Amino acid sequence: MAIKENHKFELVSKFKPAGSQPQAIKSLVEGVKKGKSPQTLLGVTGSGKTFSIASVIAQVQKKTLVLAHNKTLAAQLYNEFKSFFPNNRVEYFVSFYDYYQPESYIPSTDQYIEKDSQINEYIERMRLSATTSLLSRNDVIVVASVSCIYGLGNPKNYLGMGFDIEEGKEFLREDLLIKLIDAQYERNDFELVSGRFRVKGSIIDIIPGNERDVLRIELEGSKVDRICIIEKETGVIKQRLSHYFLFPARHFVTPQEETLSAIDSIRKELEDRLPKLDLIEAHRLKQRTNYDLELLRTMGFCKGIENYSRHFDGRKEGEKPFTLMDYFGDDFLIVIDESHQSIPQLNGMYNGDRQRKQTLVDYGFRLPSALDNRPLKFSEFEKDYLNKQNVIFVSATPDKYERKHSKNFVEQIIRPTGLVDPVVEVRGTKDQMNDILVEINRVISEGNRVLVTALTKKLAEEMADFFASKGIKSRYLHSEIKTLDRTELIRQLRVGKFDVLVGINLLREGLDLPEVGLVAIFDADKEGFLRDQKSLIQIIGRAARNSSSKVILYADKKTDSMNKAIMETNRRRELQLAYNKKHKIKPITIKKAIEEQQLVIKDTKHIPSKEKERVISQLEIEMRQAADKLDFEFAIALRDQINLLKKEISVKEKKKK
């Protein structure tokens, strides 16, 4: 059994609660202690909501799930909580797919689409790290996307299939190898990566699923002689250990006896299902399922094994799957960030998944038990988590659900920095591109950056190209850009590699950019999801971290949403100005450290075509600098991006000819 380490949350920050924070923190902490749940924190942009929540966590000392509605926001929150709790475990849990094509069937064209996916090994390691920390420590914060409501392996099996390795204790080499195989580790004596092990005589090297470094176990006869952590690249010993608990390499692990029981259960379901299908569908299902059963019997694994998860977990039909929340235990804190977006997203996950799988079941591609490989229904999430745990909704624009259910509603309007909500101007669309160019040049001359929001991906690309043609360094941000690349793109904006970022709905909740001196919203009078009151308030909030920033709405008429958003912004601004005047506070732009570069963005979709030659020149300088520092891996990544950009320019020139 894993030894549970007892640590206390320790908040590390040079900041003290200020503005509305002291009252908000006190009210939320009292609410948690008195069992008032759920609570809502209405915090304006830049008011330090994350710091307030961190203060609450430090005072209540509970494991915490922080739920964000997209990967970009989750990555930002992860970095912020890591800076607040450097001595505790802060983990990141999002979907590990870089590419995902779900299994589906289209009856009208008789077209079957096989599941296809590409897993990001780095994110998979972080997911395993999250569950490992939850089962071995009590000072854990997990920042997660809605991926946390999808099925995950049974935590009892995940813990039970792990095992202790202790220096001086008896452990036969053959027994250790069998346990590694059972825990889903693969033997590979040539290439050692996460989830693999190699054997050289009495030395066994393992890279645990949640680690980058090598765990080396040295045996002497039938005893463990030495345990140490070794740096993979250099082979240097980093740490000598007396004890190590090794968790499985994957979340979905099952003891041998349960696997055999699951096979029998699957076979019985198949026998019950076949008479209910037509001849073709029955033949298809029998052939596919028997093939999977043979693989499970001989290899212990098959493609699409998650569709049989109900049998492996021993669940009843319709019973909810195990999820990340089951790894937390009985008492933890749930923080739902940007709840006005996250709650509807949680509410909609189940139905979309169900409809696709029902078609597969009806046409004999899957057994009915595949329907139980699913995300949680919102009613299940409410019943088992929202109603049983301490919950805090966090939003600048709480929606009806939060207002209806909250037992404690806390406002955080006054910012610690004295910053006030920005001035909002409405300008006509006539000659809007020339107008924005003047504003962009003014903001850049002051050393600030610009965010521009458009309604469509095509318009965002065209605007970025237009700005580039006028000599303005610009990029565009959209859904095709990978998770980690988005974070790096935002970092590049902050350090000044470019000055204008054009986006669609990605430039809304949670983007924390103190360098932004202007937010321009085009087509502000086009009523709809991207231009309703909540969305406009959120976009306006991106300009609330800089003392000299402002917001321009380009529109030919004032819609009801625009009026409400401007009225609410002005209400908050008046409260903030009055507080500043009373306490003689001068607004100060937020100062926030910029992370060092973690990766090179391999994709080039975000770079306007007219910017590519300038970017190549800049990358060549960076490549030479990296080579001079002997950082050849980074230099090679830059070289590859340079070659890709040159190829794209060459192809475009050939098309012109």
Image: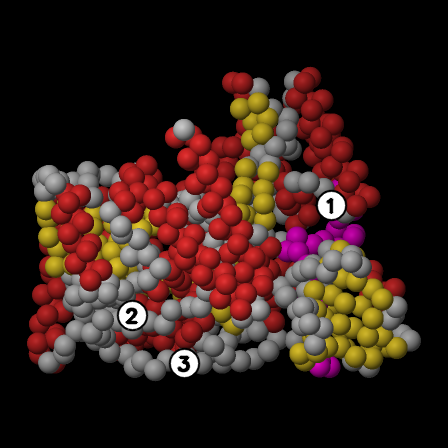
Q: Quadrant of the C terminus?
A: top left
Q: Which residues are magenta?
A: 240-263
Q: Residue 196: image x %, image y %?
A: 73, 59
Q: CA distance from mark 1 to mark 3?
A: 45 Å
Q: Secondary structure at mark 1?
A: loop
Which circle marks residue 301 in the picture? 1
Which residue has dot 2 on it? Answer: 48
Number of residues whose C-alpha sits closer than 10 Å to that of mark 3, classed few (under 14), some (14–19) or many (20 or more): some
Q: Secondary structure at mark 3?
A: loop
Number of residues whose C-alpha sits closer than 10 Å to that of mark 2, classed few (under 14), some (14–19) or many (20 or more): many
Tell me: 400 left or right of 593: left
Q: Are marks 2 and 3 in contact (CB under 8 Å)?
A: no
Residue 242 falls within the magenta-colored stretch: yes
Tell me: 194 left or right of 420: right
Q: Residue at x 38, y 69 (%)?
A: 594
Name of the residue lying farthest toward the right: 221
Which residue has dot 3 on it? Answer: 12
Is 474 in front, or is 249? Answer: 474
Q: Quadrant of residue 204?
A: bottom right
Tell me: 466 left or right of 221: left
